[in-house]
Every structure is written in C-alpha cells, then in structure tokens.
Image: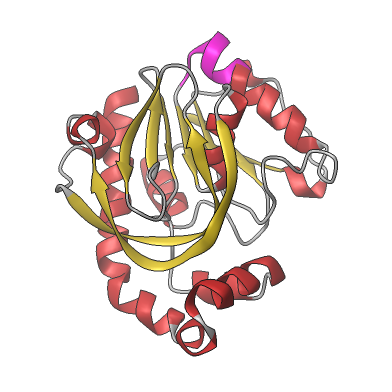
Amino acid sequence: MNILVFQHLAVEHPGIFRDFWREAGHRVHVVALDEGAAIPELAGYDLLAVMGGPMDVWEGDRHPWLRAEMAAIRRWVLELGRPYFGICLGHQLLAEALGGKVGRMAVPEVGVTATGLTVEGRSDPLLAGFGDEVQAFQWHGAEVQRLPEGGVTLAGNAACPVQALRVGRRAWGIQFHVEMTATTVAEWSAVPEYAASMDAALGAERARGLEAELAGHLPAFNAMARRLNDNLFRVIG
C-alpha cells in the first residue's frame, strides 16, 4: 500500500509502525507539515496516518498549515472514503476536522493509565483481541469533548472519556500512544511543551522516572501496536 503520513514534529514519527510497514513492503510518504512540506494530491494513497505533536487543533493562527491539514482530512474521510488512522493530535484532528470539538483538559494526562473499551469498542474490528481494559501510555493536555457526526466512542477513562473513536466505517483515532520505542520518552522530554505537561501531570520526581516506568511496559505496548496494525490492515485489505 501507499501510506501517507502527516507529521507535526520530527520526534513524533510513526515509531514502531515504521518497522511493521517496512516489513510488509508498504511505501510510506512522510509530510513534515511543521517544516513547511506541502500536502500532496491525496488520490494516490491508500491510508492516511496522522501523528501527534505539541500544537493544538485551535492554533491555526500560529500554525496556518493546520487549516490545510484539516481540509485534507475532511476530503480524505468524507469525499474519498479512505482509511484513516490518527494518534494523539491525529485523533483530535479527526474529530475537529469533521465537526467535533476538542478542548483543553483540566490536568494533562501523562504516563501509563488504564483505559476501558466501550460496548462499541469491544466489537470494533480495529480493537479485536483486546480485553475490556488496556494499559496505555498517555501524553496529552487536550481531549475530544464532542464527537463529530457519525462518531462513536470506542474507549475512554475518567480523565479522558474519548480515548478512541471511529467515524463511519474506516476512520479511527486513538488518544493514547502505542507507537513508542525505547527512545520515545527521552526524545519527547526534550520538547519544552511536553516537559511542562509531564511535570504538571506527574510532579518532578515521577517525571524523572517516566522513562524507566515505560521500559517495563514496552514489550506489552509493542505487542498492542502489532495487534492494532494487523487489525487495521485486515480491515482495509
């Protein structure tokens, strides 16, 4: 397949998914929007994957390319009807671009937390094989506060009720991170916005231990990513 990736920060890349896609022989085209890269003609791609980033969906004045990105997402999902997979900011952009609402959380959610699948989530093909509750890695200060028309909540927790959503049949967003590698926390901690949210959510002492905390969960998270990837490509064929 031809996979188009919208990337908003060099260290917020597809992570372990790059390994899966390389193994399967897929062709990947990364558009570094924050670096001024132009969005290509969409018709030649089979899957749009949209990654995270430190900016927020409402910062179009500061990052004008966000408006073009959301227009491309609308066209991709509503006009072309092609598969979409968004993580963190990519999850929020899906909701906002299609008429939902994203807002700031009272307290950022950072670290390993429990996330429960909804009734709809337990029957969704992307989450096939997952239990009623999953341990997931979080690093966000905004959340989907209203679903777009046709949106369904697939997972949530008390801190963030919309942890995963689907719009229509083939557009998914997940708020939590499954793409991490052994270097993710160190890379993200170097981003000032992420460091601030980490300290606010965890306190300085726990923040310093986040890399070690993630390391113990990494094999399980990598297995989760593999299952999500396999489920995604099984669905979109």
Q: Residue at x 39, y 84 (%)?
A: 212
**Can the viewer see residue 39 in this picture?**
no
In this view, which residue lies farthest toward the front?
106
Asked if the magenta segment contains residue 123, the reply would be no
Q: Is residue 156 above or below residue 27?
A: below
**Location of residue 178 in the rendering, given as x and y in whole percent from the top left corner:** 38, 55
**Can the viewer see residue 43 in this picture?**
yes
Instruction: Compare residues 29 and 170 and report the one nearer the observer.
Output: 170
In this view, which residue lies farthest toward the bottom?
205
Residue 167, image quadrant: top left
SS assignment for the magenta stretch, majority: helix
**Location of residue 47 in the rendering, given as x and y in whole percent from the top left corner:** 49, 28
Image quarter in which the N terminus is found = top left
Q: Is residue 182 left or right of residue 219?
A: right
Q: Residue at x 37, y 74 (%)?
A: 214
Q: Is residue 171 above or below residue 180?
A: above
Q: Is residue 105 above or below residue 125?
A: below
Q: Which stretch appears magenta?
A: 75-82
Residue 166, image quadrant: top left
Instruction: Compare residues 57 and 36 and report the one nearer the observer.
Output: 57
**Location of residue 200 in the rendering, given as x and y in whole percent from the top left corner:** 57, 74
Q: Residue at x 43, y 73 (%)?
A: 182
Image quarter in which the C terminus is found = top left
Q: How is the rendered protein coloured?
A: secondary structure
Q: Is residue 56 left or right of residue 21?
A: right
